Image (tube, grey):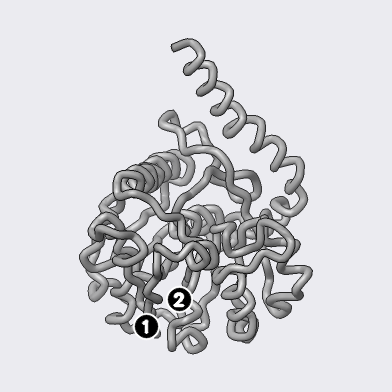
Amino acid sequence: MIRKALGYLISYTRTNVVRPWIFSYKYGKVLGRNRVLKTSELGRRCFILGTGPSISDQDILRFRNEETFIVNNFWKHPDYRELNPKYYVVTDPTFFPSFEGEKTDTIEDMMRRNGIVSSLPTKLFYNVKGEKFIQKNKLFPNNEIYYICQNGFFKSDLNFNVEIDKVIPEVKNVVLGALMIAGYMGFEEIYLLGCEHDFLAHPSFYEGFKHFYEEKKYDLADKKEVAYYNLNVKSYEDVIEFYRLTFRNYRLFKEKIAKTHPNVKIYNATPESFLDVFPFVKYEDVKI
């Protein structure tokens, strides 16, 4: 019992104290550049567009004159250029190589999106682990690029940071990362779209989880394909636990930002969404 408790204490300290301190020192200058964004959009409203299938049924061009955040593979949307999104967020470090010469679909996808993303003046937010890769390959030359650094947990006592000029906890979902950025920038009326979060409604994550774009059919028995597509094959029990923590992170963020940014209101305008942490509103009722 004592050994188990000691092991947990060491792991907790390493994850929530030691690593954030190291990362703050290592990436302090990079994260410090984010301060030019702090409260830069104070009092305004914005829309965060996820990649859920409901996006296919919505006229996203309604938001072309709004402050819009898009995430991950949203560049695949046929109306991407016409939407002209203001902000693009990618928090997952697997979009970048973890060692020299690594090749995966997500890494090559980052290269594929370069042309279309660079054709617009969208501000980009990437995981700080991608900074050297982006610079080496001279990606996104026409865009302002900001970086975020994640490590540690969302704690029940709300003793965690939500300011992107410092290390933030591991968000587990890019939409939560976008919410942190929006809150930091001062947006006070935030709407979520394309955020079904129906991960547990499917028996197999990679065979059932849908986006607005066409999905590849993966062969989870093929080890090379699993490695190339970064498929972290999990049991359904493990998936339940992962998304329990994901929803918990959303709830703790909501509680934290209610204290630190009391004027911020977040609404979920996604049809048939499971993300009930934020009050639901109808997409059709949002006035543009």
Which percent across, then down, holds residue 71?
A: 48, 68
Which percent across, then down, holds residue 281?
A: 24, 64
- As drawn, the label of residue 66 is 2
**Residue drawn at 49 percent across, 59 percent down:** 178
Q: Report the front residue among 107 and 60.
A: 107
Disc 1 residue type (three-letter): Arg
In the picture, measured across the screen, residue 142 lies left or right of residue 282, that is right
Residue 174 visible in this rendered orientation of the protein: yes
- As drawn, the label of residue 180 is none
- As drawn, the label of residue 62 is 1
Q: Report the front residue among 258 and 170.
A: 170
On the rendered image, what quadrant is the N terminus found in? top left
Q: Is residue 237 above or below residue 159?
A: below
**Residue drawn at 36 percent across, 64 percent down:** 206
Q: In this view, does 145 lie above or below 259?
A: below
Disc 2 residue type (three-letter): Glu
Spatial CA span between label 2 and label 1: 8 Å
Which percent across, then down, holds residue 190?
A: 40, 61
On the rendered image, what quadrant is the C terminus found in? bottom left
Q: Do the residues labelled 2 and 1 touch (CB within 8 Å)?
A: yes
**Residue drawn at 29 percent across, 74 percent down:** 54
Which percent across, then down, holds residue 220?
A: 40, 63
Q: Circle 2: is it few (<14), some (14-19), or many (20+) Cα within 10 Å?
A: some
Describe the element under mark 2 as helix, strand or loop: loop
Q: Circle 1: is it few (<14), some (14-19), or many (20+) Cα within 10 Å?
A: few
Residue 237 sits in quarter: top left
